[in-house]
Image: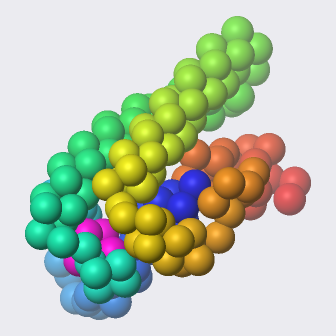
């Protein structure tokens, strides 16, 4: 959960940076999203500043967060496909299609939460007890239920910000 909040903050910062970098001219090439390695490098840089990570910890954390970011990107692509399938099923009034897309979205959400929590656990395990204590204060929700954040339902029909809300 702790890393998930940090992950959300880092991704939000990337999103804001990308939006601020947009021009009003007629650019035909969309901005390139950060790679998993770039995402991991930014997370590790921030954590190094906050927790005083050793070079060995930085190497381990980079591997952990690169793997997690790669998994997240793959799952995000699959989630977008499932969301499109759900929209198609809704507009087609296909209860079977809705059930299938919903099951896929549920499975992908489970995979994302599992990947993020596993990365959190792996990172937490490489920290000293002093760093773990400090990390816990940086990441509200450690050991708590901490609902929300990545892995939660995306906006859409019936979800936050969807029709009727």
Give the side of residue 22 with respect to residue 1, left or right. left
The structure residue drawn at horizontal position 62% and vertical position 34%, both measured from the top left corner, is: 87
- Image coordinates of residue 117 in percent, x first then y, are 50, 44
- Image coordinates of residue 149 in percent, x first then y, are 61, 58
* 20, above or below 162, in the image: below
User: In which image quadrant can residue 99 be found?
Assistant: top right
Which residue of the protein is positioned furthest toward the front in this rendering?
129
User: In which image quadrant can residue 45 be found?
Assistant: bottom left
- Image coordinates of residue 111 in percent, x first then y, are 49, 30
Give the side of residue 6 with respect to residue 147, left or right. left
Residue 92 visible from this viewpoint:
no
Placement of the N terminus among the 4 image quadrants = bottom right
The structure residue drawn at horizontal position 87% and vertical position 54%, both measured from the top left corner, is: 164
- Image coordinates of residue 135 in percent, x first then y, are 49, 71
Residue 59 visible from this viewpoint:
yes
The structure residue drawn at horizontal position 36% and vertical position 61%, both measured from the top left corner, is: 127
Magenta stretch contains residue 11: no
Placement of the C terminus among the 4 image quadrants = bottom right
Count of marks overlaid on the render: 0
Q: Nearer the viewer, residue 7 or 154?
A: 7
| Boundaries of the magenta span | 43-47
Give the overall secondary structure of the magenta segment: helix
User: In which image quadrant can residue 137 be found?
Assistant: bottom right
Which residue of the protein is positioned furthest toward the right in this rendering?
164
């Amino acid at each position: 959960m702790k890393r998930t909040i940090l992950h959300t903050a880092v991704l939000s910062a990337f999103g804001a940076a990308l939006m601020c970098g947009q021009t009003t001219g007629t650019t035909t090439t969309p901005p390139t999203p950060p790679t998993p390695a770039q995402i991991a490098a930014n997370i590790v840089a921030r954590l190094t500043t906050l927790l005083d990570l050793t070079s060995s910890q930085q190497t381990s954390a980079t591997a952990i967060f690169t793997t997690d970011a790669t998994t997240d990107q793959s799952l995000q692509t699959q989630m977008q496909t499932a969301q499109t399938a759900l929209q198609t099923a809704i507009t087609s009034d296909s209860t079977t299609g809705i059930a299938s897309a919903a099951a896929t979205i549920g499975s992908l959400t489970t995979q994302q939460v599992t990947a993020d929590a596993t990365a959190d656990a792996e990172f937490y395990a490489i920290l000293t007890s002093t760093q773990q204590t400090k990390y816990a204060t940086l990441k509200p929700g450690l050991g708590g239920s901490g609902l929300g954040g990545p892995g939660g339902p995306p906006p859409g029909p019936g979800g936050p910000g969807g029709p009727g809300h």
